[in-house]
Amino acid sequence: MGSGEGSAFPGLDAPRLRAFICRMAFTAPRYAAPSPPPGPERRGVVVVGGGLVGLTLALDLAQRGVAVTLLDDDDTVSTGSRAICFAKRTLEIYGRLGLGPRMLAKGVTWRKGRVFHGAHEAYAFDLLPEEGHEYPAFINLQQYYAEAWLVEACAAAGVDLRWRHKVSAVHPQAAGVELAITTQGGDYALHADWLLACDGARSFVRESLNLPFTGQVFRDRFLIADVVIKGDVAFPTERWFWFDPPFHPGQSVLLHKQPDNVWRIDFQLGWDADPEVERQPDRVIPRVQAMLGPDLPFDLEWVSVYTFRCRRLEKFRHGRVIFAGDSAHQVSPFGARGGNGGVQDADNLAWKLAAVLNGTAPESLLDSYDAERIAAADENILHSTRSTDFITPKGKAAQAYRDAVLDLAAQHPFARSLVNSGRLSRPAILAGSPLNGPDAGQGGAVPGSPLPDAPLRRDGQPDWLLRQAKGQEMLLVCAPPGPPPLPGLPTLFLSPEEAPHAAHDHAGLARLRLGLPPGGAALVRPDQHVAARFAWPDPVAIQAARARLWGRA
Ligand SMILES: Cc1cc2nc3c(=O)[nH]c(=O)nc-3n(C[C@H](O)[C@H](O)[C@H](O)COP(=O)(O)OP(=O)(O)OC[C@H]3O[C@@H](n4cnc5c(N)ncnc54)[C@H](O)[C@@H]3O)c2cc1C
């Protein structure tokens, strides 16, 4: 999503840099590189790239019974300053995949933000003002933790993990892709029936297919410093964003708390800043001291200087090659939409490809991945571009507008909606999806929305609505009697009354958030999005919506 300029510390050679990283609370694992096979191989599904998105996709596919080979040119997880803000929808996806509780336990939960202009607070916001959700609006968690846990989960699910197996040539064919793989033990040829390109912003697969990756480069630079603060910190666990603060005049600054007492600070530098000079510790330390005060001891954990781009591929599916994550689209970090968007790509693609491979759906279902995720990427790019334009105004008129909006925001709520310090990642609502069926709901989760969470009770024990949607298609019916059982369609009754084993919608929030009348029903997709809403569970209408959902209509 962004382009880091060189290594974090140019003065450190690789072994010293590794030693430096090892001083972090997190020790980067080193994964064994398997020997190359003795001759050419054939595999059904090959994922290229063991980053956040490739690992998530491989895990989801493996949990759906698909045999997956994952190739990565490295032997560890991502290091340094990358994603920290994991949004509610991402946590819900990881909840389905079994990693949500671990992320929640380690991550720093937050939902409130403050925006400052100069020395004063302009306003504060709350991203999840309502109760009754299992996961919070956001947690902050270093990307390397998420990746390390994904690797463990992939290994447990039987993913064939091949570290230091670099894809060095890609030749698409009608029924698959011929790959050349380079390893330290020699090269080999690998035929993939399906190639899932999750090889990041500089995607080799994308370049090999000569696909244009078009968009905008922002003429600004940002210094990203991860610092370990050793004393008591006056900052609460909130997102703080400053426009033109006294300690960094004329620029912006963003502060986030991460686990292990690490704080992420982003300093806007301007386009003319020299990245080599700016990431030297003797330049960084005074900037941090000016912000935190001279007496608060801290260590620099990681420093890098970034420029940002917003761009995407025209299409994500190219026959048997499908792109996901940063290889398909890039955004600026303001809004935390890169990794969160990529995880939603994986969530969207896994069930569709699994259904095509097991014969439940025709291959054309995969075209809906393009339709749905391109719309989502465009939404992310739009918000990310607007945020970046607001944070780095182009010209005097834009600067004057921004300052006026910030001045007004302190007193006038209407102006707060115009302040844009990063519209934070929201789940894509796939409103225009070709898979959506009829909608007889009112308000609430329209077809295409992720299923909203809500508290339930079962036999007096607390439970959650989203936990009921475990990755399969299902029908939610707001109160019995409901339809006769439909083949292959698990049905859950949301009971307004307490009854043995019933999913008791004790607060009425499940029905309210679904936007359904008593007795109404919702068809839920395997990726937990709502596919259709019915005033009553009419079996004929439900079967028609199912046919559409699986690309058979
Ligand atoms: C400073 C910064 C802050 C960010 N903050 C956030 C945030 O708060 N929230 C958020 O959601 N996102 C954030 N992002 C974005 C997020 O980090 C990325 O969107 C995410 O890493 C994309 O994951 P990916 O798996 O698509 O790509 P990557 O993580 O880049 O993984 C690609 C993988 O492919 C491998 N690979 C590459 N080429 C080959 C090859 N030829 N053969 C085999 N393997 C190959 C690489 O080794 C790598 O492991 C941030 C990014 C930056 C830079």
Image (spheres, rainbow, N blue to C red):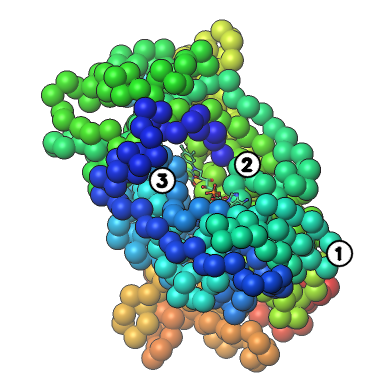
The type of residue carrying mark 2 is: Arg
Counting residues from the N terminus, which is met first, the one under dot 1 or under dot 3? Answer: 3
Question: Residue 365's spot in the image, x, y percent?
Answer: 77, 67
Q: Is residue 57 visible?
A: no
Q: Report helix, strand or loop for mark 1.
A: loop
Q: Secondary structure at mark 2?
A: loop
Tell me what residue is drawn at x 71 percent, y 70 percent.
40
**In front: 378, or 508?**
378
Please name the amino acid that badge 3 sits on. Thr
Q: Under 8 Å from ligand 1: the CB of mark 3?
A: no
Please name the residue that numbered disc 1 is placed on: 174
- Residue 105, horizontal then vertical, whole percent: 30, 60
Residue 77 located left or right of residue 265: right
Q: Is mark 2 within 8 Å of ligand 1?
A: yes
Question: Residue 206, image x and y in percent?
Answer: 71, 47
Residue 166 lies in what quarter of the image?
A: bottom right
Q: Which mark is residue 79?
A: 3
Q: Which three-letter amino acid code belongs to the residue tagged 1?
A: Ala
For the C terminus, which image quadrant?
bottom right
Gap in Å between the C-alphas at discs 3 and 2? 17 Å
Q: Residues within 10 Å of mark 1 (few under 14, many from 20)?
A: few
Pinpoint residue 280: horizontal percent, then vertical percent. 35, 22
